[in-house]
Amino acid sequence: MLDPDDIAIILHAIATGFPDRAVNVVAMSDKIDENQRAVLWGALTADPDRSTQARHFGDALRSLGAERHSVNECYRAAFYASDDWKKLSSNPFFAFFSADRSGYPLDKWIHYFPIYERHLARYRGAPVRVLEIGVYRGGGLELLRNFLGPDACLVGIDIDEVARAAARGYEVEIGDQADPEFLQRVSQKHGPFDIVIDDGGHTMRQQTASVEALFPMLKDEGTYLVEDCHTSYWPEYADQGPDGLTFIEWVKARIDDLHAYHYSRSEHLQAPWQTCLDGLHVYDSVVVLTKARRAAPFSELTGTSEFINYPRQTGAIHLEMLATRDAAISRAADLEAETAAVRAQAELETAAIRAQAEAEGERSREELRPLRSELAGVRSDMARVSADLERLREEHEQTCSDLLGSWGIIREMRQSRSWKMTAPIRRLKNTLPPR
């Protein structure tokens, strides 16, 4: 295969208008076999246009298994030899990228820029929050700052500590984009985000883990953009995601989710992919997911000319029904307002009555205080009288007991022999005059 120096000579000859020199390099090279020579010769001679020659030459190299870098140089030459760069010159991303020769390092596929403008233009000048996965040396953040404006809050994620120092002036969190807990912490600290751009490690596990963690936390009407999805086709990036899927295969499953209303029998569709994935845009190497809660889809028929010969009586009835409905709604609103006013008045009157009752209760309590004091004195006197009565009762009972005892003694004495013998003396004594 031709080496990079040979390819550079061929592309220079094409760009400067000397295709014969380019053909001569292919014809005289001893680094290719005859089959390769025929393929490359045909690519250089099939069309006189410089841009077409460069592009066909890149196609031929790609078909022969040349290094990606060499093919990339051919397509670059084809782009700048055509008018395509002029069409793209009005794109703000491309304009900044082309002019910024001494700023932060930035490595981008040129065809990404129209995609960026298409999906990010609506955020321009707004105070949006943006997360870029894969900061490298800060060029991507600077590109977004130039486009979105000074009100945008830009945050980066990178696994390399050097990125934090290189992207001076920007907030950069260090961590693994395949770690959902790390991504959740970043979102809680700096989000929720309106825009997420994944330009990180590009492995299948990284791309899938990041979108599954961050898309549910994305703001409504948000945009999630994944770059360099062509790595799904490169074996060196086959760090497989869930179920061994490439990221593009994961995206194909999301297409099914977009159509879930038309085939799923589940009462509740799965969030967020079947309910909040508003759109899925697939480009060469770029996938864009937009978030919004979608209304359930339905179809409707119109254009049937049903207005022709539409009965006036039916129309009048419909209008009368609408008028009656509007009147009922208005009356209901009036009644609700009147009810609210009556309720408010009742609450005021209730509060006044409660306050008056409390005031009267307080006055009654003041009047009762001396009466309660007098009652307490009476109760004390009654207690003393009760004690005296109890003492007198006890004394009475004791006196009665003593009298009963004395009466028993007297009765016994009267029945004695001596009492009977002295009876005449007592009678005589009673007849004598007192002294």
Image: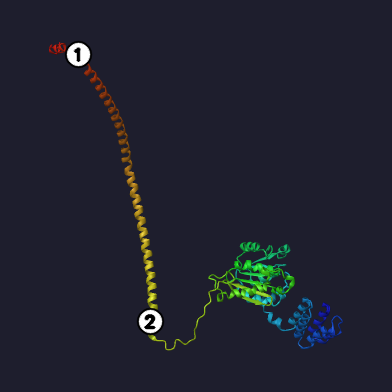
Picture layout, residue 435 above or below residue 304: above
Quadrant housing residue 134: bottom right
Callout 1: few (<14), some (14-19), or many (20+) C-alpha neighbours within 10 Å? few
The C terminus sits in image quarter: top left
Give coordinates of residue 127: x percent, y percent: 60, 68
**Residue 151 visible from this viewpoint:** no
Residue 402 coordinates in the image, percent (x, y): 26, 22
Q: Does residue 212 appear to the left or right of 12 in the view shown?
A: left
Please state which of residues 36 and 317 is positioned toward the viewer in this rendering: 36
Query: Which circle marks residue 419 in the picture?
Result: 1
Q: CA distance from mark 1 to mark 2?
A: 135 Å
Q: Quadrant of the N terminus?
A: bottom right
- The residue pinned by badge 2 equals 317
Q: Identify the element where label 1 is drawn.
A: helix
- Relative horizontal placement of residue 384, taking residue 269 as reference (left or right): left
Residue 408 vs residue 125: left or right?
left
6 or 280: which is nearer to us? Answer: 280
